[in-house]
Image (spheres, coloured by chain):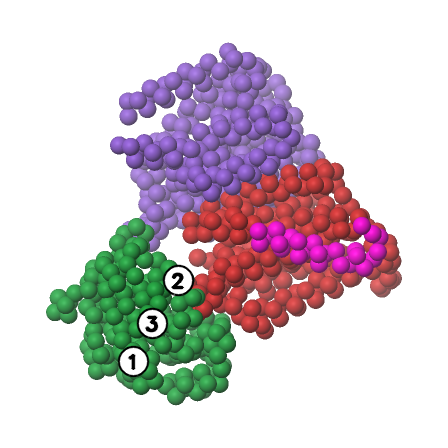
């Protein structure tokens, strides 16, 4: 459903991604694993349309989206949870989660049902301000927000990074449930150990290029 | 006391309209619009031209709205046509572009409305006066304060209780993330510029009967607007409101008590606030 | 390097010969030299420290009003006293104002410089008994070591000496460890902080250098013109002109601001004599430079020279 074909991305004129190709299939959980600065976040941001690609093609559901803006790609069904959560600090939890749903105009009750089924612990937090939540709860809100507009593909940038083990496994099982709903997941992690059980495939990435997993260690 | 308070409130109303526009534009675009005073002045001139058509009081009372809308439209054209071309090149260039506009406006004003000051207090006479605690006040002055207060409420409602306001606030927190949730940020920019310039032009239109217009008022108003925004905290509407009231009232009492240094008092307040709280009264955004 | 030296020498000779072409060109070039130093001083902050001051007229005015007030109230007419006094006041003003401003960066810094310059503008404007208010102060009969300096040509050479001395000193300052540290802070505040550099102190230093040189230019401006007023030496437009000149000439180049000041000053004189709409032209120039030549005249020339090699 998602295909990157030899994309090249520069940041401040420095090449960060080089001829990078990868694929994500329907209802598949794929993880990009690599050290810091390898280009994981850049890959995700390029797919979302935040960073422009210099050359190469990004195809989503058979459509060439390479020249589309982020807000247009969102409308095709891509959800995004950025690195470091980046919630709206002055918005309540529920306003954060429902933000994309309200932009698209989808049924809010339906969204709430789905999100709280996956993250029941957010249910009694809905009216707190996002900035008052703990780090783990904020990550959940960020993932929940990425799901709000019924996406077909969600991009999760280091969703498990820096979480306590209990919270981490809760969030990981939440992510694996997405697959059962027919949602594809592309996530980035710097460490493959926590996600081994939930992912279908792993891409190793190093210095902006796809490498064999063995090459990472 | 009463006349000073009323005058202070008039001054505060106008400062708020100007500063709110400045601060909203800054919140979204991270640009301080140096031509904001020029949009204010444009509002007065437009209101002046509109009221040349007829002496009908309704037209006088409607003119600030038309002036605001036209100033807003000019602001949109400026944002789309010029300012948007330098986004991402750093705030120096964005600032300079809005600064360059001040001069373009000056000659537009000179060509369009001449070099002499204009004024038209007709509506003040038509509406007559009311007596408050023994003081005779032009009814128009009370109208001005009331309408500015209503506009402040409308603005608050718009920003905090509507979908558009939610989008504006989200964009001001984080453009990138907000665009990836389906918001066309460019449209938010245009809308914000319209809103900001509308407020300035509207404020200008309201002041036609009170002060009139002259070239130079643009820069005076810009500087006062900047002072209010600095005192209130950059990007904070609440701050703009509180600082407008503070500075409006202080200046009004200053004019009657220490006319020689009234304007200086305003700056001294600003310096004092900044020494105690560098980010302004309600400011958190200092990156 | 060699060909550049020849260019500089040629320019120096031309500047030296300007008074032979008549009084008006001399007057105009004198102004351009003073604005050139002011723009250069502004660029110590903008180009080298990364801080945009929209209030440098404050120093220009401090220098000018020091001269004006000493003459008006104390009948001091000796330039050898007036000039150092201007240095002292602009230094003092820069320390006091800098203390408030340098804790801020970016737009906050810019807005503070505007507001503080406006404070001094308001004082000069309103304290009529002291400053003469709107009408400003007239200055005549000034002496240098007992010799009356009256003609435009005499002032011009005085300014020329000041111009070359300032360029030399600023060049030395910017190439010194102090100047290099400023640029390091500009490029990466975080790295500089990790290196243990006291950023605020360096910024204050930069502010003072900028202020003192602008103040000296302002003092000579007062002597040269013989007339100062708040709008002319303290207004936002004056500050803005320094910025416009710097951008026009190129803030990435050492000589850029001086070139910008020359182009701006001559252009202003020619356009305003031919056309009443100088403001429109100025606005369009500023907007045009921002849109099409962001590096300015010298920045663009330097870029092309580098590219060719």
Q: Could you classify mark 3 by the number of other residues whose Cα lies within 10 Å: few (under 14), some (14-19), or many (20 or more)?
A: some
Residue at image location 87% in from the left, 62% down from the top: B131
Q: How many labels were placed on the picture?
A: 3
Q: Colour of chain A?
A: green
Q: CA distance from mark 3 to mark 1?
A: 13 Å
Q: Which residues are magenta?
A: B53-77
* Front-most of residues A126 and B257: A126
- Mark number displayed over residue A27: 1
Q: Colour of chain C?
A: purple
Q: Is residue B40 above or below residue A2?
A: above
Whole-percent x, y for residue C117 in the image? 57, 42
Task: Let me know if residue B258 appears in the view.
Answer: no
Q: Is residue B138 above or below residue A71?
A: above
- Mark number displayed over residue A61: 3
Residue at image location 47% in from the left, 43% down from the top: C291
Which image quarter is the N terminus of chain B in?
Answer: bottom right
Whole-percent x, y for residue A190 in the image? 23, 70
Q: Secondary structure at mark 3?
A: loop
Q: Secondary structure at mark 2?
A: loop
List the residue tagged with mark 2.
A68
Residue at image location 32% in from the left, 45% down from the top: C184
N-terminal-most mark, 2 or 3? 3
Label 3 lies in what chain?
A
Q: Colour of chain B?
A: red
**Residue A41 placement: quadrant:** bottom left
Which image quarter is the C terminus of chain B in?
Answer: bottom left
């Amino acid at each position: 459903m998602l295909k990157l074909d030899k994309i090249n991305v520069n940041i401040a004129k420095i090449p960060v991604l080089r001829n990078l190709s990868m694929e994500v299939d329907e209802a598949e959980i794929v993880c990009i694993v690599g050290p810091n600065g390898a280009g994981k976040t850049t890959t995700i941001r390029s797919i979302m349309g935040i960073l422009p690609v210099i050359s190469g093609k990004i195809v989503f559901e058979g459509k060439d989206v390479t020249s589309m803006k982020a807000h247009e790609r969102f409308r095709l069904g891509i959800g995004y949870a950025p690195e470091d959560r980046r919630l709206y600090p002055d918005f309540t939890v529920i306003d954060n989660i429902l933000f994309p749903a309200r932009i698209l105009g989808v049924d809010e009750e339906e969204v709430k049902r789905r999100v709280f089924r996956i993250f029941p612990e957010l249910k009694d937090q809905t009216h707190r301000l996002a900035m008052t939540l703990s780090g783990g709860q904020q990550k959940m809100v960020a993932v929940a927000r990425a799901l709000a507009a019924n996406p077909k593909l969600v991009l999760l940038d280091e969703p498990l990074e820096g979480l306590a083990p209990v919270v981490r496994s809760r969030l990981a099982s939440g992510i694996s449930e997405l697959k059962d709903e027919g949602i594809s997941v592309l996530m980035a992690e710097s460490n493959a150990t926590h996600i081994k059980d939930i992912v279908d495939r792993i891409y190793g990435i190093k210095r902006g290029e796809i490498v064999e997993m063995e090459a990472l260690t | 006391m009463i006349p000073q308070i009323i005058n202070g409130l008039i001054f505060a109303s106008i400062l708020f309209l100007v500063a709110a526009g400045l601060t909203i534009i800054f919140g979204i675009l991270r640009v301080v619009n140096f031509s904001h005073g020029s949009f204010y002045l444009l509002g007065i001139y437009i209101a002046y031209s509109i009221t040349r058509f007829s002496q009908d009081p309704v037209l006088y009372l409607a003119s600030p709205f038309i002036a605001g809308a036209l100033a807003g439209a000019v602001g949109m054209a400026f944002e789309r046509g010029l300012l948007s071309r330098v986004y991402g090149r750093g705030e120096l260039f964005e600032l300079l572009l809005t600064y360059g506009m001040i001069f373009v406006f000056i000659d537009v004003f000179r060509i369009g409305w001449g070099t002499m000051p204009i004024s038209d207090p007709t509506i003040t006479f038509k509406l007559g006066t009311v007596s408050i605690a023994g003081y005779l006040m032009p009814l128009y002055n009370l109208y001005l304060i009331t309408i500015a207060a209503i506009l402040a409420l409308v603005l608050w409602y718009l920003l905090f209780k509507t979908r558009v306001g939610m989008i504006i606030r989200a964009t001001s927190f984080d453009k990138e993330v907000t665009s990836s949730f389906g918001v066309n940020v460019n449209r938010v920019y245009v809308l914000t510029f319209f809103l900001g310039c509308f407020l300035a032009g509207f404020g200008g239109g309201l002041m036609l009967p009170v002060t009139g217009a002259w070239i130079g008022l643009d820069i005076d108003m810009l500087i006062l607007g900047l002072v209010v925004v600095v005192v209130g905290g950059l990007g904070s509407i609440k701050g703009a409101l509180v600082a407008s009231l503070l500075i409006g009232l202080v200046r009004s009492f200053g004019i009657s008590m220490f006319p020689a240094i009234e304007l200086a008092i305003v700056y001294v307040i600003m310096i004092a606030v900044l020494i105690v709280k560098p980010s302004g009264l309600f400011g958190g955004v200092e990156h | 390097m060699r060909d550049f030296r020849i260019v500089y020498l040629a320019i120096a000779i031309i500047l030296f010969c300007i008074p032979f072409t008549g009084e008006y060109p001399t007057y105009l070039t004198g102004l351009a030299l003073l604005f050139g130093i002011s723009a250069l001083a502004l660029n110590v902050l903008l180009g080298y420290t990364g801080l945009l001051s929209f209030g440098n007229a404050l120093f220009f005015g401090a220098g000018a009003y020091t001269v004006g007030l000493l003459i008006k109230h104390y009948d001091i007419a000796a330039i050898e006293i007036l000039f150092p006094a201007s240095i002292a006041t602009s230094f003092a003003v820069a320390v006091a104002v800098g203390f408030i401003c340098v804790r801020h960066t970016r737009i906050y810094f810019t807005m503070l410089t505007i507001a503080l310059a406006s404070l001094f503008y308001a004082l000069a404007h309103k304290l009529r008994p002291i400053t003469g208010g709107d009408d400003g102060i007239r200055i005549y009969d000034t002496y240098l070591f007992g010799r009356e300096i009256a003609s435009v040509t005499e002032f011009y050479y005085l300014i020329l000496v000041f111009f070359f001395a300032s360029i030399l000193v600023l060049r030395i300052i910017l190439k010194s460890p102090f100047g290099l540290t400023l640029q390091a802070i500009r490029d990466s505040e975080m790295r500089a902080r990790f290196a243990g550099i006291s950023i605020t102190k360096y910024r204050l230093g930069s502010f003072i250098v900028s202020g003192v040189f602008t103040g000296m230019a302002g003092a000579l401006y007062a002597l040269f013109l013989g007339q100062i007023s708040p709008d002319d030496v303290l207004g936002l437009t004056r500050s803005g002109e320094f910025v416009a000149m710097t951008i026009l000439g190129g803030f990435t180049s050492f000589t850029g601001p001086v070139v910008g000041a020359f182009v701006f000053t001559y252009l202003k004189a020619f356009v305003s004599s031919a056309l009443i709409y100088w403001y429109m032209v100025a606005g369009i120039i500023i907007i045009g430079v921002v849109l099409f030549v962001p590096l300015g005249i010298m920045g663009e020339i330097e870029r092309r020279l580098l590219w060719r090699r």
